[in-house]
Amino acid sequence: MRPARRELGLGAGPLALYVGNLKPEKGVVELAQAWPAVARHLADAELAIVGGGPLRDEVAAFAGARATLVGPQPLERVPLWMAACDVLVLPSHVEGTPNVVLEALASGRRVVATAVGGVPDLVTSATLGTLVPPRDIDALADALMSALRTRYDATEVARLGARGGWAASAAALHQVLSDAARDSHS
């Protein structure tokens, strides 16, 4: 078993992880509604939900026995949860470019997410994960079942998903800002 799982007291079965606020636009209720179908088909699969918010009770009611609402965690513990999981899930209705997806990919973890905002720019191939329509509970459940059954190379996910790391990201942002400044002076 992975050291992160041991430290967190988790079993060896497939683990899906959600990290974020428990509020409507994050799609966490749809995740909770999708999870029982996943649990019926994958007897040893677990869902960990890291975060807090106003929908905690509703999420707990839908998700069922093999889902654990961990609650808010200190920022320094999130990498431990990433290391423990097999798949990160982000079922948001709207997003920009979510850091949690960048962090998961850089950690070598595949992603199941909704095709909103900047997410399709990050999850660009089946190697990196699966995109589903927002609010589609059945598609989310199917994608999670498939992702949790599929082996993958974490090193390859990290290589493709890191997109050059922070230095490359900073250089790209600098170039965009430089081009914008130059264009505004033209």
Image: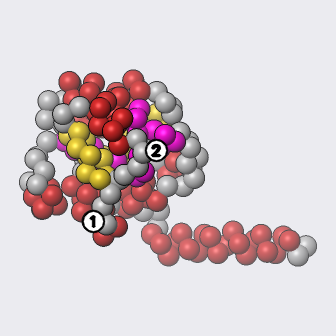
Q: Which mark is residue 77?
A: 1
Which stretch appears magenta?
14-31
Query: Residue at left 36%, top 35%?
Result: 58
Relative horizontal placement of residue 14, taking residue 158 as reference (left or right): left
Residue 63 in the image, given as x and y percentages of width and height: 28, 33
Visible residue check, residue 155: no
Residue 176 in the image, given as x and y percentages of width and height: 69, 68
Q: In terms of depth relative to the viewer, which is nearer, 23 or 36?
A: 23
Query: Residue at left 49%, top 30%?
Result: 135
SS label for mark 2: loop
Separation of residues labelled 2 and 1 (CA atoms):
21 Å
Q: In terms of depth relative to the viewer, which is nearer, 152 or 48?
A: 48
Residue 138 is inside the magenta segment: no
Visible residue check, residue 69: yes
Query: Residue at left 39%, top 23%?
Result: 138
Q: Are marks 2 and 1 in contact (CB under 8 Å)?
A: no
SS label for mark 1: helix
Kind of residue at badge 1:
Arg
- Mark earlier in primary sequence (2, 1): 2
Residue 172 lies, with reference to residue 16, above or below; the image says below
- In the rendered image, which quarter is residue 16 located in? top left
Relative horizontal placement of residue 137, taking residue 9 as reference (left or right): right
Residue 30 is inside the magenta segment: yes
Residue 132 lies, with reference to residue 18, above or below; the image says above
Residue 10 lies, with reference to residue 116, above or below; the image says below
Q: Which residue is mark 2?
A: 23
